Amino acid sequence: MKDHLIIFDTTMRDGEQSPGAAMTKAEKIRIAKALERLKVDVIEAGFPIASQGDFEAVQAVARLIKDSTVCGLSRTGDADIDRAHEALKDANSFRIHTFIATSPIHMQKKLRMEPDDVFEAAVRAVKRARNYTDNVEFSCEDSSRSDFEFLCRIVEATIDAGATTINLPDTVGYAVPEQYGDFISRIMANVPNSDKAVFSVHCHNDLGLAVGNSLSAVMHGARQVECTINGLGERAGNASLEEIVMAVRTRHDFFPCETRIDATEIMNCSRLVSTITGFPVQPNKAIVGANAFAHESGIHQDGVLKHRETYEIMRAEDVGLNSNRIVLGKLSGRNALRTRLKELGIEFSSEQDMNAAFKRFKDLADRKSEIYDEDLQALVSDAEVETAKEHIKLVSMRVHTETGETPQTHLTLSVDGNERAATSGGDGPVDAAYKAVEQIMGSGVQLQLYSVNAITTGTDSQGEVTVRLERGGRIVNGQGADTDILVASVKAYLNALNKILYPVHREHPQPAN
Ligand code: KIV
Ligand code: ZN
């Protein structure tokens, strides 16, 4: 019998700390449902004290999810722990995750606390959380740069206080695999009561080693890995869930443990998280990148055709990649759409949302004969945007481009119900369109990122555009999809502009210590 490796997903908490990735309650609910279908053991839904919005999102996820444990993060203060409990208390199964930094640099420069005070705060926090639940996780932030003796002392004391999971994060992505694995086993060997808790790892990817470090820790006794879909996360991101899961599964001959993940849900989760956060997946990303299962070279293709295992260690179907299966078309009705969306884990809370999605589906099917799962994901996001009552909407657009001429875009926007038009030239039609929008809105935003991605293959594919806008230090991402990439570009820009000018999204998901 192999050990169970607990998969703890923190896409909606640590992943959300990526610039512009803050999620609304509705978006968190969609991701939580997808994670439950993926069968992750623990879903860290947010940081309840960070804002009223995050409190409500965690509470909604806690009330909805039945098959995964729902977790909320808290610092060590009483108010943080009480707030986390308040958000989580209706869950079928919940965990309070409390943390404090233990490295000299964090204690001195950030917390301005003495080690003994940090020790006391940690023990007190775990005891308080234990009053609410017997499922308590304690994390030593920046553990990989902490003093070994101090770490052993605080881990032993927090286990005595009732922590059932001890997490040893590599917060700044500083560790390297051999050393980190050795570090985990030395802590476990030196802490007398280490058998009373599950040891967990949480690695950041600053040196590109997050997955390697996590797997090394698993080989040295860690039995929980904290990770995110697509490796989303602050700076270079967190360890990627799909890479950890598929490594353990593909190399079951090597790893002494297994997960309960339903890997066929991986692609669905990956697309959903990318669409919602506006973080595209790089084509050569392991497991979920567009090229992950594409064999281009003649030698490889020949080998794969003769015998798949010559070059393939996993099958695309294993991770839920159905090689662009056509799912619906122009003649498909509302029931067919509802059924396929349900299979993708998407259910609408109101008929109004379903109607908006169906209308978009019909509009798309008029322009595109074959509709794929990827199109449906984008369409649902668009429908959510529409029902979210955006203040600024695209009414119409006319673009003129000709070789050797400056492109011109004329567009009409509806701003709180009033139509306003502008015409502008630009370096290209997208530039001209964005300049026309700014003539109308004068928002003062800075465009930080613009990227276009084909949702499926073929020239009839919808283009999915992501933009990142910044204003006064606040960053938001916007997305838009359409068969016309100029329309998709304007939709994405307006989506981001609506968020930045009329914020319902949270400013930044993590409060300062
Ligand atoms: O990276 C980190 O240390 C964290 C903790 C709060 C677990 O995200
Ligand atoms: Zn982290």
Image: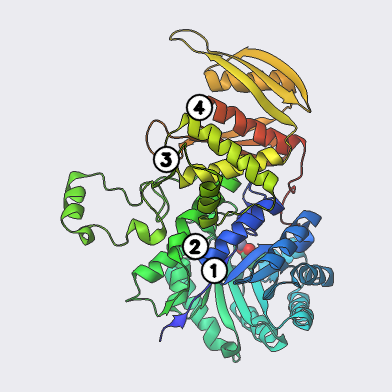
Which sits earlier in the primary sequence, circle 1 or circle 2? Answer: 1
Q: Report, in whole angstroms, how far the alpha carbon at label 3 lies from the one at label 2.
A: 23 Å
Q: Is residue 352 left or right of residue 326?
A: right
Which sits earlier in the primary sequence, circle 3 or circle 1? Answer: 1
Which sits earlier in the primary sequence, circle 2 or circle 4? Answer: 2
The C terminus sits in image quarter: bottom right
Residue at the top extreme? 405
Amino acid bearing label 4? Asp
Disc 1 versus disc 2: nearer the observer: 1
What is the number of the mark on residue 241? 2
Q: Is residue 203 visible?
A: no
User: What residue is shown with label 3?
Assistant: 456
In the image, residue 187 above or below residue 271: below
Q: At x 67% / y 45%, what residue is drawn?
A: 353
Instruction: Judge the density around disc 4: few (<14), some (14-19), many (≥20) Cα neighbours within 10 Å.
Output: some
User: What residue is shown with label 4?
Assistant: 484
User: What residue is shown with label 1?
Assistant: 40
Q: Report, in whole angstroms, how far the alpha carbon at label 4 lies from the one at label 1.
A: 37 Å
